[in-house]
C-alpha cells in the first residue's frame, strides 16, 4: 500500500463515502456509462520471470527452495511467468482503518503455484461441512517468488510519479535502521492533504513514522526533454533479516485472488 501524491485520481474518496464524489461518479455512470465505475481500478499489470543473477541470489535467501521448482517447471519455458503484479488506483479495503488521503496498491500472485489445497467429505450427510484446506503457502518453493514479487512491485511503485511514500502498517515490520524500512508522507504532501485549519499535520508525537526521503537524483531540467524529467531512486538493499521479515508478512497476509478458485467446464 502506497501513498499517492495529492491530486492523483484514485477510488479512495468514492470508496470512503464522500457524498459529492459519489454523486458525480454515479451520475456519470448512469448518464454515459463512463468514469471510474467503467473500470475495476487495475491500471497496469506485469508478468515477470527472474534473471539468472536473481536466481543465484535466491539460493542464499532464508527459504531457498524455489530453485528446484524453477528447474522442474519454469526453466527453458519463457512463456511461463513466475509472478504477476498489478497497480490499483486506490485502496479497496476498509477505509476506517486507513489515514485520510489518496493511495495506490500493488498486488501480486503466483502464476503457477506449487502449493495445493484439498477438500474432503467428512460425513455421509451431503450438508455436512467439508474438511477444506486452502493450502496457501504449504509448499516452500512458493516463498521466494512471493518475497521477490513484493520487492519488484515496491521498486515499481517507488518510481511512479504518484508515489508519495508508504503506509507503514501495510508493509513488513523492518528494523528502524533498515534501509528497507517504509517511509510515510513528507511534510509538504501532509500539509496538502490536511484541512486548512489542521493544527497537527506533521507532528510526530508518539509515532515512529519517518517522512519519505528526497529522491536520490532529481531531474536535470536543462539537459533532458520534458518526458524524461524523472526523479530517480536507488534500488533498496535487503538484508537477510529483511527477507525474513517479508516472509513473515507473506505468511500473515496471503489470501485468494478471488477469481483463482477453480475451473469449471461448461458444455451444452
Image (cartoon, rainbow, N blue to C red):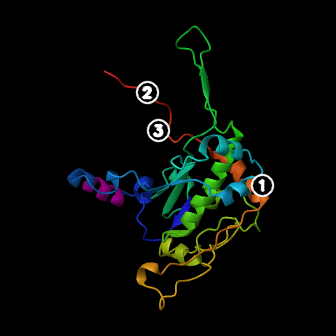
| C-alpha distance separating marks 2 and 1 | 40 Å
| Among numbered discs 2 and 1, the one appearing first in the sequence | 1
Mark 3 and mark 2 in contact? Answer it, CB < 8 Å. no
Instruction: Find the magenta span and give its range.
Output: 20-28
Quick check: can you spot residue 142?
A: no
The question of residue 43 being in magenta is answered with no
Q: What residue is pinned by disc 3?
A: 259
Q: Residue at x 75, y 48 (%)?
A: 64
Question: Which residue lies most toward the top here?
Answer: 124
SS state under label 2:
loop
| C-alpha distance separating marks 3 and 2 | 12 Å
Q: What residue is pinned by disc 1?
A: 60
Mark 2 crowd level (few <14, some 14–19, many ≥20, 10 Å Cα): few
| C-alpha distance separating marks 3 and 1 | 34 Å
Predominant SS of the magenta segment: helix
Q: Residue at x 34, y 60 (%)?
A: 20
Tell me the quarter of the picture where residue 129 sits. Answer: top right
Q: Residue 264 got which mark?
A: 2
Amino acid at each position: 500500500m502506497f501513498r499517492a501524491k495529492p491530486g492523483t485520481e484514485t477510488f479512495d474518496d468514492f470508496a470512503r463515502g464522500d457524498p459529492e464524489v459519489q454523486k458525480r461518479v454515479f451520475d456519470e455512470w448512469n448518464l454515459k456509462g463512463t468514469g471510474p465505475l467503467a473500470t475495476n481500478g487495475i491500471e497496469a499489470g506485469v508478468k515477470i520471470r527472474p534473471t539468472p543473477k536473481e536466481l543465484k541470489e535466491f539460493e542464499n535467501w532464508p527459504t531457498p527452495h524455489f530453485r528446484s521448482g524453477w528447474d522442474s517447471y519454469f526453466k527453458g519455458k519463457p512463456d511461463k511467468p513466475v509472478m504477476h503484479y498489478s497497480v490499483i488506483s486506490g485502496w479497496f479495503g476498509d477505509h476506517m482503518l486507513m489515514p485520510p488521503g489518496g493511495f495506490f496498491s500493488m498486488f501480486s500472485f503466483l502464476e503457477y503455484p506449487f502449493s495445493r489445497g484439498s477438500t474432503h467429505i467428512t460425513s455421509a450427510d451431503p450438508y455436512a461441512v467439508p474438511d477444506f484446506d486452502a493450502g496457501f503457502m504449504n509448499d516452500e518453493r512458493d516463498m521466494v517468488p512471493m518475497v521477490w514479487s513484493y520487492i519488484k512491485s515496491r521498486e515499481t511503485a517507488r518510481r511512479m510519479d504518484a508515489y508519495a511514500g508508504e503506509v507503514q502498517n501495510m508493509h513488513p515490520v523492518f528494523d528502524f535502521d533498515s534501509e528497507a524500512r517504509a517511509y510515510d508522507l513528507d511534510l509538504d504532501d501532509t500539509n496538502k492533504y490536511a484541512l486548512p485549519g489542521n493544527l497537527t499535520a506533521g507532528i510526530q508525537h508518539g509515532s515512529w513514522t519517518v517522512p519519505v526521503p528526497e529522491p536520490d537524483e532529481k531531474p536535470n531540467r536543462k539537459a533532458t526533454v520534458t518526458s524524461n524529467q524523472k526523479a530517480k531512486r536507488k534500488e533498496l538493499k535487503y538484508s537477510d533479516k529483511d527477507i525474513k521479515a517479508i516472509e513473515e508478512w507473506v505468511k500473515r497476509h496471503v489470501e485468494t485472488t478471488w477469481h483463482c478458485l477453480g475451473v469449471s467446464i461448461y458444455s451444452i
